[in-house]
Image: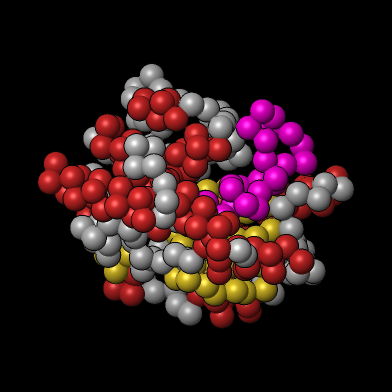
Amino acid sequence: MNIKVKQELQLNAYKIRKIALQTIQTAGSGHIGGSFSIAETLSVLYFSQMNVDPANPKKPDRDHLVLSKGHCSPALYTTLAMKGFFPVEHLSTFRKIDSDLSGHVECHVPGVDMSTGSLGQGLSVALGMALYGKSKGFAYRTFCIMGDGEIQEGQVWEAAMAAGYFKADNLIAFVDHNKLQLDGPLEEVMSPNPIGNKFKEFGWNVLEVDGSDVEQIYNAVELASVCKGKPTMIVLDTIKGKGVSVFENQVRFHGGHPNADEFKIAYAELNAKIAELGGNKNV
């Protein structure tokens, strides 16, 4: 990856954070922590990897994405708006009673492939999409993003076993390993560690990367795309609330929005990072 592409992808990740923050603050609610920890992954997927077309959101040969941790809708909705699926201004309606942009992602929104948020179900759906694509001769890839707390759900492991058994090599999944969930630190609630080893036992190709490094994520997706005979799990080592000092590693920002002072700090830090990366802080 050349330096210019890397910088652009990192810049987009911080734009996702800033616009998602504004979206959450306008709504007065929304999930900051998990949205911020997947910003780099969404930037890599939508701005360098995925075959999608905002002018034709339902084209049959498109790559698919299931955001299984559907409560992190601010990040995905922002990414889709930045990509051109709908106007960025529409994000101001997020969580309003008459808006299509609800707190959990829904497939009536252009660019969303699956309504999610009932945790643990996304990998099963993504596997179904992947197997359907194979059966119809489509070359598309199916991506699935899960939370590390989410994989405490038993259905995840049924899907993992089935994906390995059926050699679904067009399925590329991610675990956002930010180590915090709603009820506290992952290790104190119910640890799924070592995550990678468990998926390996179910026949998956496993890659472990720094989830804040766009180049590592990009390279992992490239490797996953040429892996034959196995689905791929990319374990992302991330920080909940990544990118803002007052949000990072704070359980209360799993689903809480900042107060006025915290918002000012966050807004200033994100603007500074965007400027450092050569972007326009007025985005």
> Residue 156: horizontal and vertical position, in percent?
55, 61
- Give the side of residue 269 with respect to residue 275, left or right: left
Q: State the residue in front, 45 or 178.
A: 45
Colour scheme = secondary structure
Q: Is residue 160 magenta?
A: no
- Tell me if residue 94 can be seen: yes
Q: Quadrant of the N terminus?
A: bottom right
Choose top left, top right, bottom left or bottom right for residue 52. top right
Picture coordinates of residue 223 (x, y %)?
Answer: 69, 69
In the rendered image, which quarter is residue 254 located in?
bottom left
Q: Which portion, as a residue range, is magenta?
A: 43-65
Tell me, yes or no, whether the highlighted magenta stretch contains residue 44: yes
In-front residue for pair 81/9 = 9
The one nearer the camera, 199 or 43, is: 43
Q: Residue furthest left?
A: 261
Which residue extends farthest right?
Answer: 137
